[in-house]
Image (cartoon, grey):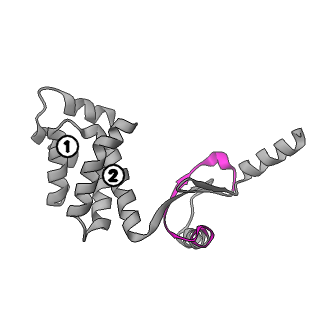
């Protein structure tokens, strides 16, 4: 949604500038908070007129030890009624972080869980194929049957069994 992205941009840019030396750790806690903020129940609680900022902060952080920057950002977002924007802030922050480091996010969809060595080999192959440094994450998609599907930015490399079966189906129908 364009509106959320527009609202999220100043928060992401300010956080990026403020956390300039600690981008990796910031990305970790920001992703955790964004995953929490993605909950409809939490957002409903935060929007309740009787819930104040301190209560919502306590529910979100629990007994986790978060850096002061995380608590400040979270408090500001809750206070301004922008909790729904936190996942967009995390996405935009990640994009800024990747642009600064010259890397790109890559999602590898696999039919089965991948071991560390297999993931390292896939990452090296993808970095060579796309000619850039990649931050690779893996998601399981059993519908692929076998093989992998890699999404790097707006490019897709699909070597899955499912894709090959679709290609064969199209060839037979032609």
Residue drawn at x 77%, y 45% as measured from the top left: 166
- Position of 150 with respect to 47 (left or right) is right
Mark 1 sits on what residue?
A: 77
- Position of 75 with respect to 161 (left or right) is left
Task: Name the mark on residue 90.
Answer: 2
Range drawn in magenta: 126-146
Residue positioned most to the top: 49
The percent position of residue 154, horizontal first and vertical second, equals 55, 53
In which quadrant is the N terminus drawn? top left
The percent position of residue 28, horizontal first and vertical second, equals 32, 60
In which quadrant is the C terminus drawn? top right
Q: Is residue 65 in sight in this rendering?
A: no
Mark 1 → mark 2, Cα distance in angstroms: 13 Å
Instruction: Tell me where residue 78 sits by quadrant.
Output: top left
Do labels 1 and 2 touch, CB within 8 Å?
no
The percent position of residue 30, horizontal first and vertical second, equals 29, 54
> Dot 1 surroundings within 10 Å: few (below 14), some, or many (20 or more)?
some
Element under disc 2: helix
The percent position of residue 103, horizontal first and vertical second, equals 45, 67
Q: Is 145 included in the stretch rendered in magenta?
A: yes
Residue nearest the viewer, comparing 47 with 114: 47
């Amino acid at each position: 949604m364009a509106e959320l992205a527009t609202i999220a941009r100043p928060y992401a840019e300010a956080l990026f500038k403020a956390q300039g030396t600690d981008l990796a750790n910031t990305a970790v806690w920001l992703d955790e908070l964004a995953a929490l903020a993605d909950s409809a129940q939490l957002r409903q609680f935060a929007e309740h007129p009787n819930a104040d900022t301190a209560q919502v902060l306590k529910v979100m952080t629990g007994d986790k030890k978060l850096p002061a920057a995380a608590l400040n950002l979270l408090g500001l977002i809750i206070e301004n009624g922008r909790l729904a924007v936190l996942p967009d802030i995390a996405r935009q922050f990640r994009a800024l972080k990747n642009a600064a480091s010259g890397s790109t996010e890559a999602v590898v969809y696999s039919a089965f869980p991948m071991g560390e060595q297999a993931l390292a080999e896939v990452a090296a192959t993808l970095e060579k194929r796309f000619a850039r440094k990649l931050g690779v994450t893996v998601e399981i998609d059993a519908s692929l049957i076998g093989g992998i599907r890699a999404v790097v930015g707006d490019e897709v490399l699909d070597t899955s069994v499912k894709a090959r079966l679709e290609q064969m189906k199209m060839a037979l129908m032609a």
